[in-house]
Structures are given as structure tokens and as C-alpha cells.
Image (cartoon, rainbow, N blue to C red):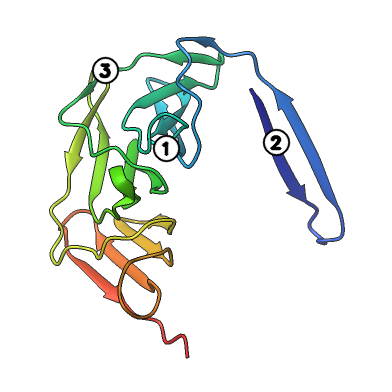
């Protein structure tokens, strides 16, 4: 596996390319693209949590994998609960020791509007589907940020007749949400 990162100097005049080759052990996940990859900590170790995506054989993957960044080993960590629908082009952010995943494209490239939490437990993690009121308009390829207890989605693509997705804000503790339309004219 090769990870490539571009670093920009503070004066924005120069950039540096860093190439890091990792030799990972353990049960490797299927090759994929348009997945999410989120850094989290579990039992004092750093992990890269990989979820979903697609590949040549499957239009939407719903599997979850943990790469221990401390020893470059794909590691099995128990996940309880019902896994979310397979998806690609979704967004994911670290949240309270786990991950919040939103939207994306499901099987048949159908846009999804759900929000799910992968929360930490004493033995691993647990899936929890959030019930949002009102529900978010299904979207994919959006940017996502967690600020405090709020999930902020910016842009993306939806199947509405007009416009583009603006900004959606969800309170992750109450499930309240609001969609803000941006004037693009």
C-alpha cells in the first residue's frame, strides 16, 4: 500500500510530496474506491476505519475494516448491531470515539439520506441509526464536518429538480436537522 500526502509550506510557495510504503499484514479487504476512511482510537491504538465503497464486481460495498496504524495490521474488532446499507460516495467523520457516516449512493446508485453512528463499546463498536427530524434530503459526494455535537454537510449531489445541496446541519444528540439552501444565481 502506498500513501501519498501533499504538504504545503506556510507561505504557499512550495509543496512537498511524501510517499510512504506500508507493508500491511492481516486479512486484507477487497480493493475498492469511493469508500470512507476515518482515523479513530480504540484501546489506546490508532486505527484507520474503512467502510463501504465499490469495486469492479460490486456496485456498493457494506463491509467495515480496521487498519491498526501503530503496527500496520488489518485487525478484527467486533461490531454489534445492524450494519448500514452498503454504500459508496458517502461521508464520514470521527465523533465521540467512533464515526458518523452520512448519505452516499446505495445499490443501484440510489442516493441515501440516512445518518449512522459507529459508537464505541467495551468490546468494540456498535452501529446505531439516527432518526432525524426532518429527514435529510438524500445526497452523495458531500463534505462533512463535526463541530461539537453537530454534523455539518456541505454541498454534494442530489436528485432534486433544481439547485444543488447547500448546507445541512444535524444535532447528533437530539436528531434535529435543518437544510439551508444556498442561492446559486
Report if residue 106 is visible in the image: no
Badge 3 marks a residue whose secondary structure is: loop
Labelled disc at residue 96: none
Discs 2/1, front: 1
Q: Which residue is mark 3?
A: 78
Q: Is residue 96 left or right of residue 33?
A: left
Other residues around mark 1 within 10 Å, as few (<14) / some (14–19) / many (≥20)? many
Q: Earlier in the sequence, mark 2 or mark 1?
A: 2
Q: How many marks?
A: 3
Q: Is residue 161 above or below residue 7?
A: below
Q: Which residue is mark 2?
A: 4
Residue at the far top: name it. Answer: 26
Q: Which residue is mark 1?
A: 53
Badge 2 marks a residue whose secondary structure is: strand
Q: Is residue 166 above or below residue 107?
A: below
Identify the residue at horizontal 24%, vertical 39% (top origin): 85
- In front of the other: 90 or 150: 90
Badge 1 marks a residue whose secondary structure is: loop
Image location (x, y in percent) of residue 15: 82, 50
Q: Earlier in the sequence, mark 1 or mark 3?
A: 1
Amino acid at each position: 500500500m502506498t500513501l501519498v500526502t501533499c504538504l504545503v509550506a506556510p507561505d504557499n510557495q512550495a509543496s512537498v510530496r511524501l510517499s510512504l510504503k506500508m507493508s500491511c499484514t492481516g486479512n486484507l479487504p477487497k480493493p475498492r474506491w469511493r469508500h470512507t476512511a476515518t482515523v479513530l482510537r480504540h484501546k489506546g491504538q490508532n486505527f484507520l476505519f474503512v467502510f463501504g465503497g465499490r469495486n469492479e464486481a460490486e456496485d456498493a460495498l457494506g463491509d467495515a475494516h480496521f487498519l491498526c496504524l501503530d503496527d500496520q495490521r488489518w485487525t478484527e474488532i467486533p461490531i454489534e448491531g445492524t450494519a448500514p446499507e452498503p454504500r459508496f460516495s458517502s461521508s464520514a467523520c470521527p465523533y465521540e470515539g467512533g464515526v458518523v457516516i452520512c448519505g452516499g449512493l446505495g445499490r443501484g446508485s440510489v442516493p441515501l439520506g440516512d445518518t449512522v453512528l459507529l459508537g464505541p463499546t467495551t468490546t468494540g463498536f456498535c452501529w446505531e441509526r439516527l432518526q432525524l427530524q426532518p429527514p435529510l434530503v438524500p445526497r452523495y459526494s458531500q463534505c462533512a464536518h463535526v463541530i461539537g455535537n453537530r454534523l455539518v454537510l456541505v454541498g454534494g449531489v442530489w436528485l432534486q429538480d433544481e439547485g444543488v445541496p447547500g448546507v445541512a446541519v444535524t444535532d447528533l444528540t437530539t436528531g434535529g436537522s435543518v437544510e439551508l439552501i444556498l442561492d446559486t444565481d
